[in-house]
Image: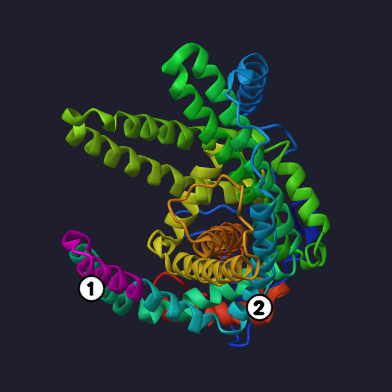
Amino acid sequence: MYENNYDNTEPIVVQGFTVPTKAQPSASGYDVGKQDQPNASGEFHKGEIQPKLYKDVGFAIAFLLHLGGIVVVTTLYGSSVNSENEGSNNYMGVAACVGVSGTFSITLSTFALGWMMQFAEQVVKMALMFSIGTSLALGILGFMYGQMLIGLISFASAACGCCYAKLVWNRIPFAAANLNTALTGVRQNLGLAVVAYIFLAIAFVWSIWWSVAATGTMSVFGQGSLFLFFLSFYWTHQVIQNTMHVTSAGVIGTWWFDPSEASSCWSSALTDSFRRATTYSFGSICFGSLLVAVVQALRAMNEHARSQEEFQMLVCLIDCLLGCIQGFIEYLNKWAYIYVGLYGYGYVDAGRNVWTLFQTKGWTTIITDNLIDNVLFMISVVIGLATGIVGLVIAVSNDGIFDGAGVEVGVEDPTVLGFILGFFTGLIMSNILMSVVGSAVNTVIVCFAESPNEFQTNHPKLSDEMRGAWRKAYPEECKY
């Protein structure tokens, strides 16, 4: 348990492990042990490991009951799905292309982690330029094909991107230090990537299962249950995504406080964090996921209503409002689930505690910085393009590979189909690994806000790098 007496002679227990807290001086001679003191109002309290109790149990039960309901309707009405053409198509060519492309993208993504660690600052700069360049390219294409509105919006976006780059340029070393620290933690726990790909497979199976259940049920009873099926679809996908996020937070947190327990591909920290995420904290994950899923389901229903032309303006306004609500909830979830993964808090307590931490530290501006998101997006797109080229080569070197696949994508050239399959395979696979990195970056920010002295003790080189970068970017907020 964290103790609020801040006596560095007492051990701290994190994720079930006892870790030392005796402060070590940094290279600059700074006494990091003083930074864990509460502020003048005494509002700052470190997170504490929660008892091993199931949190937000009602939401976990509701989620499992909902899955049971899907099983029932699939059993009763799944056979109603028209399977007239079942077995008539040959998908071996598509499977081969996706398999080779997926293997290539996983390999390239793994090498990309090392490359980003070595050139973190340059990668952040490239991401800013990539965002501006993409907008310019879209603007040029828009004018070339007579789409003036798209062209104008794209050029305006590029201009805003230039202004944003100028504004945040001095914060690039700060973002690079965060990224490098997070990548180091992920590289030392690459089993996280394996778990992420397993979750990807589960999400794929769920999508197929859901489509059979929804199509079969609505073919019998009509679309009266459409909202419930949308809710089911998005809730399950949110649960899968957030379980991975909580697992990543637990592993990186253990690496932060006790690296000996989280410095191998399949460490005990990974096993313990995954077990907690799928047991004690599963209800909290279902709770926050349901909030987002409700909004997503409402947006899907709103999109479904676009067919009625007389309500287009109203539909657009409602979609904008729902989009803002969804973004706000997802933003809160991103930080709340880190506290869930680190300490095992319930959903509401986790959100309140982590937000109080940032407010107390004066970091509410720091956590809105999205430089790292730009980097992860750029890397995913580049890997997707590279994998698309692999798919194109496969299509060119294997004439007729897609014959009989029954795939209709609106193109006649099989090489284009090969590129499309490769691109989306690479984009999805790389994005899975990059999402783990994103979770690690957010966990690093929370841990650095709360426990900088433990970081100096266990990772002195990375700690000195982060302190220097943070002091330059945010001299008022960061006193380390």
| Mark carried by residue 159 | 1
Where 309 sits versus 115, above or below? above
- Say which quarter of the image contains residue 452: bottom right
- Say which quarter of the image contains residue 60: top right
Tell which of 389 and 232 is nearer to you: 389
Instruction: Give me the residue at 69% from left, 65% from top.
Output: 256
The amino acid type found where label 2 is placed reads Gly
Instruction: Give me the residue at 49% from left, 18% from top.
Output: 218
Q: Secondary structure at mark 2?
A: helix
Residue 142 colored in magenta in the image: yes
The amino acid type found where label 1 is placed reads Ala
Q: Position of residue 233 (x, y in %)?
A: 53, 32
Q: Which residue is disc 2 drawn over?
A: 114
Q: Position of residue 42 (x, y in %)?
A: 49, 53
Q: Secondary structure at mark 1?
A: helix
- Say which quarter of the image contains residue 264: bottom right
Answer left or right for 147 relative to 175: left
- Extreme residue in the bottom direction: 28
Where 432 sits versus 371, above or below? above
Instruction: Give me the residue at 80% from left, 64% from top.
Output: 265
Where 457 sits versus 244, above or below? below
Where 99 sits versus 324, above or below? below
Instruction: Give me the residue at 56% from left, 30% from top.
Output: 211
Going from N to C along the chain, the mark reached first, 2 or 1, is 2
Answer left or right for 420 relative to 243: left
Disc 1 packing (10 Å; few <14; some 14–19; many ≥20): some
Give the extent of the magenta segment: 132-150
Q: Position of residue 29 (x, y in %)?
A: 60, 86
Q: Position of residue 108 (x, y in %)?
A: 65, 72
Tell which of 443 and 381 is nearer to you: 381
